[in-house]
Amino acid sequence: MRKAGVLVGNTLELVAAAVRAGVSTGDLNEIAAKSIRDGSGKAAFLGYRHPSGGKPFSGVLCISVNEEIVHGIPRMDRYLAEGDIVSLDCGALVDGFYGDSARTVAVGVVSESAQRLLGATQRSLDAGIEMCRSGQRLRDLSGAVESVILGEGFSVVRDFVGHGIGRRLHEDPQVPNYVMTGGASGYLFREGLVLAIEPMVNAGGWETETLSDGWTVVTKDRSLSAHFEHTVAVTSEGPQIMTLPG
Ligand code: MG
Ligand code: MG
C-alpha cells in the first residue's frame, strides 16, 4: 500500500504547488492525471459510480472550492480566485492496492477565519492519526477528531465519513468524525488495519446538500468547508501514514 500512498502524496504535492489565482480546477486535474499515469497508477475516482446511480465521476481529482465540501467535479472553466480555499482529494490504485488522501489549500491570502478552519481541520486529522494504534477503539478515534473541531467552534460533517481501505477504495469499517450517540463503535484496532481518516469540517452548520450535477456536496448554509485526509496503517511501531510524499 506504500506505493499507492506515495504516488497519491506526490501527486497532491504537485497539484498543491500549482494552486494559484487564475488556474482552473480542470488544469489541476490534468496535472494529477499525468502524475498518476507517470507513476504507473490508475486514478481511483475517474469513472467511479455513485451507489445511488447517476453519471460516473468524470475527474481524476475531486476539487471542492469554498462552500463545496467534497466531490467537486474539475472543470476547465472553473477558475480559482485570490482568497478561495480549495480542497484537493486524490485516490490511486497501484499493484492492486489503493491510497487516498486530501488537503485543503489557500489560494493566495485568505481570511483569518478560513485560515483558522484549515488549521483546525488539519489538527483534527492529526489527532485521529495519533489514535491509530493496536488495542484502540474506533469511537476513541472519532471522539479525538470531533473534540478538536468542536473546541474551535466548527461543525463536523455527518453525512460523509472515512473508511477502511486496501484492495478496495472503500472497505469496512466506516470511520465517522463524530461519536455516534447510542450506537458508539467498539470496533477494535489491530496491526495491519489501514484506515482513510478524513475529517470534513464546516465553518457553519454540519448540514449538507448535493448540487444538481449529482456529485458536488456543499454546506447547506454555504459556509466554508475544509477537508484533510490520510491513509494510515496500524503497525507494531504505531501509526504509519501511507500517503506522505516520498
Ligand atoms: Mg479521499
Ligand atoms: Mg476517502
Image: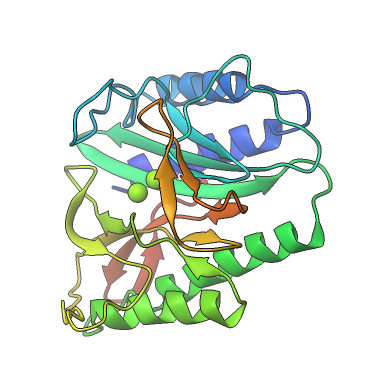
Picture coordinates of residue 14 (x, y %)? 61, 33
Image quarter of residue 76 = top right
What colouring method underlies this structural image? rainbow
Picture coordinates of residue 6 (x, y %)? 43, 43
Name the residue at the right extreme.
109
Residue 29 drawn above or below residue 119: above
Picture coordinates of residue 60 (x, y %)? 42, 25
Residue 112 drawn above or below residue 87: below
Residue 207 drawn above or below residue 68: below
Q: Is residue 90 visible?
A: yes
Which residue occupies 49% across, 18% down? 34
Which residue occupies 44% across, 58% down? 207
Which residue occupies 43% across, 34% down? 211
Q: Is residue 153 left or right of residue 188?
A: right
- Asked whether 138 or 99 is in front, the reply is 138
Q: Is residue 3 visible?
A: no
Name the residue at the front extreme.
221
Q: Is residue 225 left or right of residue 99?
A: right
- Asked whether 13 or 104 is in front, the reply is 104
Picture coordinates of residue 49 (x, y %)? 23, 28
Image quarter of residue 45 = top left
